[in-house]
Image (cartoon, rainbow, N blue to C red):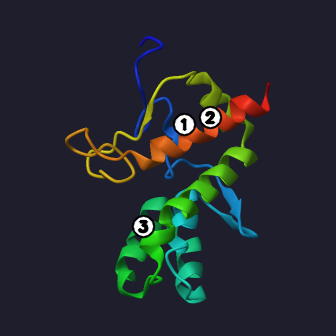
Amino acid sequence: MNDKDPILFYEREFYVFSNFSSFNVEWKGTLWMTSEHAYQAAHFTDEKISESIRNARSAHDAMKLARANQDKKRADWKEIKLAVMEEIVRAKLAQHAYIRKKLLQTGTREIIENSPKDSFWGWGPDKDGYNHLGKIWMKLREELIASTK
């Protein structure tokens, strides 16, 4: 791997950037087992649903609970989901020195969530998706580099 190769983080060395990685995050005054738990709970204003997601045993279970309640998600979700994800990822980065170290190790390389299915947050099956999660990490990397100068 050279310094021009993209960073692929779905299931590799940089998995720490995945919302499923085992790094808890405090967000909006609540401690979440993973950033995926926080993101999935943010879909809802119903505290019972959010709490059941917070208590899910794994990030995968949190995602399944959110999908099971999809008909109850907040009406403005499509408009706010990018901002919510950035807020949660920003909190995760701020709370874990190891993740900051890994992010700086990426240098100037493109960061890609190489999800084989998700073309919104990752690059998807055709490798031409939006990669919004990767873009969030690259934005935060720029901010981190600027703050350390």
Q: Are marks 2 and 1 in contact (CB under 8 Å)?
A: yes
Say which amino acid is labelled 1.
Met
Residue 108 sits above or below residue 88 on the image? above
Classify residue 111 as left or right of residue 87.
Answer: left
Residue 93: horizontal and vertical position, in percent? 67, 45
Q: Nearer the viewer, residue 49 or 22?
A: 49
Three-letter residue code for mark 3 = Met
The dot on residue 108 is none
> How many marks do you count on the picture?
3
The residue shown at (49%, 75%) is 43
Rendered location of residue 66, percent (x, y): 43, 75
Q: For numbered disc 1, what is the local secondary structure?
A: helix
Per the image, label 2 sits on a secondary structure element best described as: helix
State the SS at label 3.
Answer: helix
Q: Which percent across, then down, holds residue 27?
A: 69, 64
Q: CA distance from mark 2 to mark 3?
A: 26 Å
Q: Position of residue 54 (x, y in %)?
A: 59, 72
Q: Residues within 10 Å of mark 3 (few under 14, many from 20)?
A: some
Q: Residue at x 73, y 31 (%)?
A: 146
Circles 2 and 3: CB distance less than 8 Å?
no
What kind of residue is marked 2? Arg
**Label 2 sits on residue:** 141
Q: For this view, does 108 lie left or right of residue 91?
A: left
4 or 14: nearer the eye?
4
* Sequence-wise first label, 3 or 1: 3
Where's the C terminus, which quadrant?
top right
Residue holding disc 3: 63
At label 1, counting other C-alpha atoms closer than 10 Å, the crowd grade (few under 14, some 14-19, many 20 or more) is many
User: Residue lying furthest left in this view?
Assistant: 126
